[in-house]
Image (cartoon, rainbow, N blue to C red):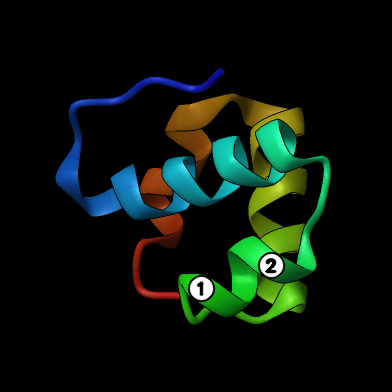
Amino acid sequence: MLHTNNPIIKHKADLLNLAKELENVFKPCQVMNVTRDSFYRYQELVEKGGIDALINRHLS
């Protein structure tokens, strides 16, 4: 589970956590109004650089 106190990336971390918890990408993306393309970009950033990698991408 990803944890952050940074409000800029909390929404993205919550999205990734929910998808992992539900073992589903479609529903969390639909509920949080995020495209699956964006989800997979966020996931890749976290896999490569950890949660902090989302900070520089906060405008995506």
Q: Position of residue 12 (x, y in %)?
A: 45, 52
Quarter of the image holding residue 11?
Answer: bottom left
Quarter of the image holding residue 20?
Answer: top right
Q: Count neighbours of disc 1 (C-alpha within 10 A) and say few if under 14, some if 14 to 19, many if 20 or more.
A: few
Which residue shows up at 72% across the image and 46% down it?
A: 43
Which residue shows up at 75% across the image and 74% down it?
A: 36
Picture layout, residue 59 above or below residue 2: below
Picture layout, residue 51 above or below residue 12: above
Q: Are marks 2 and 1 in contact (CB under 8 Å)?
A: yes
Q: Give the labeled residue for mark 1.
A: 31
Q: In this orientation, which residue lies closer to the viewer: 28 or 4?
A: 28
> Disc number at residue 48?
none
Image quarter in which the N terminus is found? top right
Q: Position of residue 10 (x, y in %)?
A: 31, 44
- Kind of residue at disc 1: Val
Q: Give the labeled residue for mark 2.
A: 27
